[in-house]
Image (cartoon, rainbow, N blue to C red):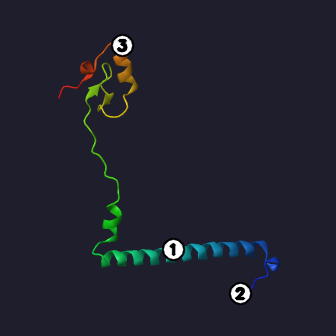
Amino acid sequence: MADFDLEALSLSELRKLQKDIAKAITTYEDRQKAEARAKVEAFARELGYSLAELVDSDAKPTRAPVAPKYRHPENPALTWSGRGRKPQWFVEALEAGKTAEDMAIDL
């Protein structure tokens, strides 16, 4: 490694050196990640899997959207599936004397 007299460098030379060091660090990290990925992929192949199969298998399954069961009495654009927290409009309608059956969507 070269010894530098940082005190002797100008501001522009120091900034260029800083930029070069940041680039060298990024390049080094990218090489390390590529090596690690290659090792993990090789190990997965030894076990008979692809890396994508192993990584994707841990993903949380997503639920399909549920059809709405209830519709706002005055604004048909507002709906609720009946799952999760009750929307405010539903609670207010119940407090006003409506029943859930009154707001149910006929299927």
The image shows residue 77 at horizontal and vertical percentages of 32, 28
Residue type, numbered disc 1: Asp
Residue type, numbered disc 3: Ala
98 shown above or below 38: above
In the shown orientation, is residue 91 left or right of residue 104? right
- According to the picture, the residue beneath numbered tag 3 turns out to be 96
63 shown above or below 74: below
Q: Residue 30 — which label?
A: 1
Question: In the image as oriented, which residue stretches furthest toward the left?
Answer: 107
Instruction: Please tell me whether mark 2 or mark 3 is closer to you in this view.
Output: 3
Q: Quadrant of residue 7?
A: bottom right
The mark nearer the N terminus, 1 or 3, is 1
Tags 2 and 1 in contact by the CB under 8 Å rule? no
**In percent of the image, x 19 and y 25: which residue is there?**
106
- According to the picture, the residue beneath numbered tag 2 turns out to be 2
> How many neighbours does mark 3 have within 10 angstroms: few (below 14), some (14-19), or many (20 or more)?
few
Q: Quadrant of residue 23?
A: bottom right
SS at mark 2?
loop
Closer to us: 56 or 21: 56
**In percent of the image, x 35 and y 23: which residue is there?**
90
Measured Cα–Cα span from mark 1 to mark 3: 62 Å
> How many neighbours does mark 1 have within 10 angstroms: few (below 14), some (14-19), or many (20 or more)?
few
Q: Residue 50 — which label?
A: none
The image shows residue 82 at horizontal and vertical percentages of 29, 31
